[in-house]
Image (tube, rainbow, N blue to C red):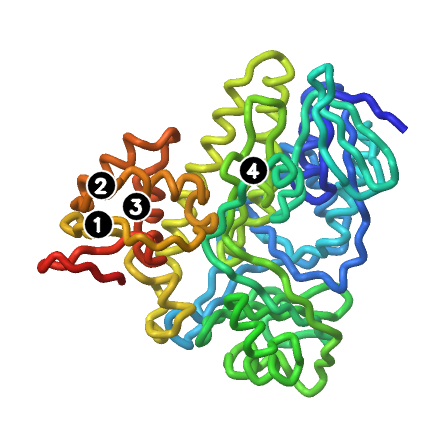
Amino acid sequence: MLTECDVGIVGGGVAGCGTAIALRNRRPLSIALIHKAEARLFPVGETLQPQARELAEKLGILEELRCTPHLPSNGVCSAWGDSTLAYNDYLFKASGKGWLLDRAAFDLSLLDKARRGGVHIVESSYSRLDSGADGRWLLSTRNGAVIRCRFVVDATGRRSAVADGLGVPRIRFDELHAVYALWEGRPEVFPHHTLVESVESGWCYAAALPAERFVTAYFTDKAQIKANRLTQPDRLLPLLSRAPHIGRLLSASSKLVGTRVVVADSSMLDFAGSEKGWLAVGDAASAYDPLSSLGIAKALGGSLAAAGAIDSWLGGESGEIDAYCRNIESGFDQYLAQRHHYYGLESRWKKDPFWKQRQDWIGIHPDWVLQRSGLRKKIPNRIVSSEVLEQILAAFGDEARRAHEAVRLVRGALQRRFSDYRLIQAMRYLVESGHLAVQASDGGVFGL
């Protein structure tokens, strides 16, 4: 079965549906959206801050927020840096209350709005993307449906499945994962606040859900979850109980329903899109640490921005796509700086690997003398793509160079422009991975 349309969207979450709705709000484009309904083990609990109300109004989805079974959110309380709770109450701000989302209900309401707005929903899983002879894209699904379209949107979340099929690398900045636990029972403490609490080797989160349930999450690095078998309740519960405020929620009347592990890393595509008729939106383009609480709002804002860029491209103007991609990258650089700042506010476990990795000074001293170490180990996509990391190493040749000279040399050698922040981060990563060595005063070399 072949469907002809202007835009094909892969992914029926907030970013995918939001982009479809925003495009149809602009003009009556023909849009097909590939969506496979997946039975989630349980909702993870997500907060939409009141500042997102303006984005919801622009998309025309405020009614969906009002009519679905979400809980009001009065704000966030956190114990970060010490054990004292600090409150950020929405009630005292002009934008009012936020929402503790029933994410499954919210996603379904957006999908239904897109359908009612004229978007063709293809209920299947995405299979592959091919380029047709006429310059259009051919999107194939697992049930045999084919969508021929002028423009493709990757809204598949951190998997970035469409971009992956195109060979676009995903750059990861950490290995943050979360172990979520669903509980039956109404939390008598903090019923309308999201609770965030830092602990040794990670941080915890708790939020109420509809139907007298609540969810907790423990965020740490992937290796810690595996090594400590934290998906097992008897290993997870003692750890949660060591967080004083989270522990108060786990009363005798609370019943554990189940656990699940979710990827929560900071990552982005090496290219958020291109002039060739595709782009990524939401977490597929760039994904932030859940500590930022920006996931849903970022998806809504990204949907509006993507729709504007796509509309311009379909009208013959490709410059908006380039600007959209630059904004993704610059926004991610700003986020990285904020992330480093907030993790740096916790000073109790400076030697713990989890905290040390996120708090260490990110930089290279201008007087360091750097040279290639000769290490032949494969370099993963980290900070920038592995290809760019290899280009950085190649720029050194066999010479030892002072860091401030090396930065200028590398910047001139790279085919792409990166912010100073990203470039210095990448060089620091090469030092830490052993691919660049710091030369000692006697001419020897040592790593960090």
Q: Is residue 444 above or below residue 247?
A: above
Disc 1/disc 2 C-alpha distance (Å) = 8 Å
Residue 16, horizontal then vertical, whole percent: 69, 38
Question: What number is the disc on residue 406?
Answer: 2
Disc 3/disc 2 C-alpha distance (Å) = 10 Å
Foreground tag (4 vs 3) = 4
Given the image, on which type of amino acid does mark 3 rest? Ile
Category of crowding for the residue at label 1, using alpha-carbon neighbours closer than 10 angstroms: few (below 14), some (14–19), many (at least 20)? many
Residue 204, horizontal then vertical, whole percent: 53, 70
Residue 102, horizontal then vertical, whole percent: 72, 56
Foreground tag (3 vs 1) = 1
Disc 4/disc 3 C-alpha distance (Å) = 23 Å
Foreground tag (3 vs 2) = 2
Q: Which is nearer the eye, 302 or 373? A: 373
Question: What number is the disc on residue 424?
Answer: 3
Q: Which residue is mark 4?
A: 168
Nearer-N-terminus badge (4/2): 4
Foreground tag (1 vs 4) = 1
